[in-house]
């Protein structure tokens, strides 16, 4: 029996290049590639390129460096500073081939460099490598497209190794399992995607270049930011979640303020509040952290504190001056009468 041919390489590629002849050549080199089916769009300068990315984010960007209105360096800087677009791989296209030029591009977190003129096979090799890397990242969490556990651990390890001061925010939805059981997995997936988009939008609004958002799995997310902005960002996420989560419920359940879920474990029907969010903030300010497992251990301890509080809460291990736990938000220290979250 003959083996089936492997599926062709696919990907959506945006070419940002001001030279119309070169734009056409790149498009032909990509669309004529054997064993590949690429959807190629083009933009004639950096301004149009940014508009195209915002309209429909591609899987990969081929970006000319020297362009009118907005050069490639600035386009790269804006895309990498935005959590919504920071994970899109960028390959610089340039006539500049000096070591300093390449270092400058890599300092802006460009993913690769292609010097003009190039051969078609070199272009395709670099494109395939970047698309393969991106697929590996996205496969970590297919539902949200956010970096998963491997990349979260890698990001945390990198910051620890470089001696950076950071804050790790663990975002955990309360009563999500009850919601999932009540409304079904399809509605639950909508909630998870909504939270992922909300976190990215919140970082775009309140975060800084270099901030990181990831999806551990299920209803657990991670944000890594600077210690100085951690409480501000955590409380902004809490407020945004509380202000919008009602849109995920049916009207009659909103009026009741709870849902009734059949419990297979305890038997009978149990009442569950509407979803809230518990945000745990762990910082290496005033604390020696040598590996990611320490962050997770502290986060687990904080989770016990957070789950004993009612409503959406932000719980920090300490302020920057080393003082202990700081509850933030609308918190009551009495445990709720409802089942554990």
Image (tube, rainbow, N blue to C red):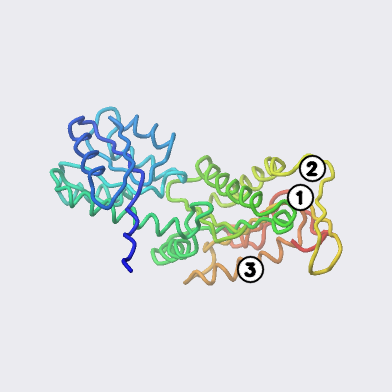
Q: Which residue is mark 2?
A: 254
Circle nearer the N terminus (2, 1): 2
Query: Number of labelled discs?
Result: 3
Q: Which mark is residue 274?
A: 1
Distance between mark 1 and mark 3 Cα atoms: 23 Å
Q: What residue is drawn where x is 73% and y is 62%?
A: 307
Circle nearer the N terminus (1, 3): 1
Distance between mark 2 and mark 3 Cα atoms: 31 Å
Give residue 146's position: percent from left, percent from top: 49, 53
Give residue 336's position: percent from left, percent from top: 82, 59
Q: Residues within 10 Å of mark 1 (few under 14, many from 20)?
A: many
Q: Which residue is mark 3?
A: 300
Q: What residue is drawn where x is 70% and y is 59%?
A: 177
Give residue 75's position: percent from left, percent from top: 33, 38
Q: Secondary structure at mark 3?
A: helix
Quadrant into which the N terminus falls: bottom left
Residue 27, by quadrant, is: top left
Q: Are marks 2 and 1 in contact (CB under 8 Å)?
A: yes
Residue 29, by quadrant, is: top left
């Amino acid at each position: 029996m003959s083996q089936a041919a492997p599926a062709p390489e696919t990907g959506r590629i945006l070419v940002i290049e001001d030279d119309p002849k070169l734009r056409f050549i790149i498009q032909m080199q990509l669309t004529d590639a054997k064993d590949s089916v690429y959807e190629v769009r083009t933009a004639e300068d950096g301004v149009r390129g940014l508009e195209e990315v915002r309209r429909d984010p591609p899987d990969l960007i081929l970006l000319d460096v020297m362009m009118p209105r907005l050069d490639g360096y600035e386009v790269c800087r804006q895309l990498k500073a935005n959590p919504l677009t920071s994970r899109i791989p960028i390959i610089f296209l340039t006539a500049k081939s000096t070591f300093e030029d390449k270092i400058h591009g890599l300092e802006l977190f460009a993913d690769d460099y292609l010097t003009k003129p190039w051969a078609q096979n070199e272009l395709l090799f670099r494109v395939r490598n970047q698309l393969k890397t991106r697929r590996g990242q996205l496969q970590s969490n297919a539902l949200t497209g956010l970096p998963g556990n491997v990349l979260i651990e890698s990001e945390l390890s990198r910051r620890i190794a470089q001696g950076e001061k950071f804050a790790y925010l663990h975002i955990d939805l309360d009563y999500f399992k009850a919601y999932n059981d009540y409304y079904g997995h399809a509605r639950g997936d909508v909630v998870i995607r909504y939270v992922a988009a909300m976190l990215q939008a919140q970082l775009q609004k309140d975060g800084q270049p270099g901030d990181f958002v990831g999806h551990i799995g299920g209803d657990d997310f991670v944000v890594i930011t600077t210690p100085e902005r951690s409480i501000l960002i955590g409380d902004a996420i809490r407020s945004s979640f509380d202000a919008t989560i009602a849109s995920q419920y049916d009207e009659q359940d909103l009026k009741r303020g709870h849902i009734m879920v059949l419990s297979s474990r305890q038997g009978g029907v149990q009442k569950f509040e509407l979803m809230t969010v518990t945000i745990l903030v762990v910082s290496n300010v005033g604390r020696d952290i040598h590996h990611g497992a320490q962050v997770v251990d502290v986060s687990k301890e904080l989770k016990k504190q957070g789950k004993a509080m009612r409503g959406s809460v932000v719980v920090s291990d300490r302020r920057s001056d080393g003082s202990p736990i700081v509850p933030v938000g609308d918190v009551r220290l009495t445990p709720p009468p409802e089942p554990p979250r």
